[in-house]
Image (cartoon, grey):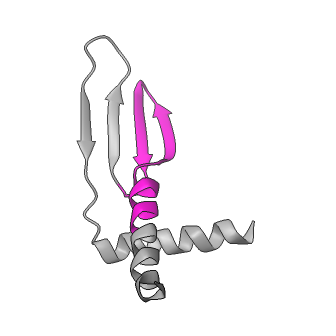
Amino acid sequence: MTQFTNRVERQKQRLALEKWSKEVKQLYAHDGMIETWYNNGDIHYEENKPKGRKWIVYAKQTKDELIGEFNRFEVDQKRK
């Protein structure tokens, strides 16, 4: 059964990457605007007033760039 160990580990890493990429990296509020930054690079904007607009700016990261950031995150977490 050890023949699938690499595939299982790779799938675990993919699932962890998907979960991590949807987590909030930072919140920034200024002049009635709320910016929510996510680990995958997406930024959600929201005007904090009645009938305020909401919009999303999607990151143009490649999958390799995202995997690199996730790997750096994992290494940093292991150091703590």
Residue 32 visible here: yes
What quarter of the picture does the C terminus occupy?
bottom right
At a point 46% along the width and 56% down the height, the residue shown is 20
Location of residue 40 in the rendering, given as x and y in whole percent from the top left corner: 37, 58
- Boundaries of the magenta span: 14-41
**Left or right, 62 with reference to 18:** left
Furthest residue to the right?
Answer: 80
**Within the image, what quadrant is residue 66 found in?**
bottom left
**Within the image, what quadrant is residue 6 found in?**
bottom left
Location of residue 29 in the rendering, given as x and y in whole percent from the top left corner: 48, 33
Furthest residue to the top?
Answer: 50
**Left or right, 76 with reference to 13:** right
At a point 43% along the width and 75% down the height, the residue shown is 8
Location of residue 62 in the rendering, given as x and y in whole percent from the top left corner: 27, 72
**Left or right, 31 with reference to 76:** left
Q: Is residue 19 above or below residue 10?
A: above
At a point 25% along the width and 52% down the height, the residue shown is 58
- Nearer to the camera, 59 or 4: 4
Location of residue 41 in the rendering, given as x and y in whole percent from the top left corner: 36, 57
Furthest residue to the front?
Answer: 1
Magenta stretch holds residue 23: yes
Q: Is residue 66 above or below residue 28?
A: below
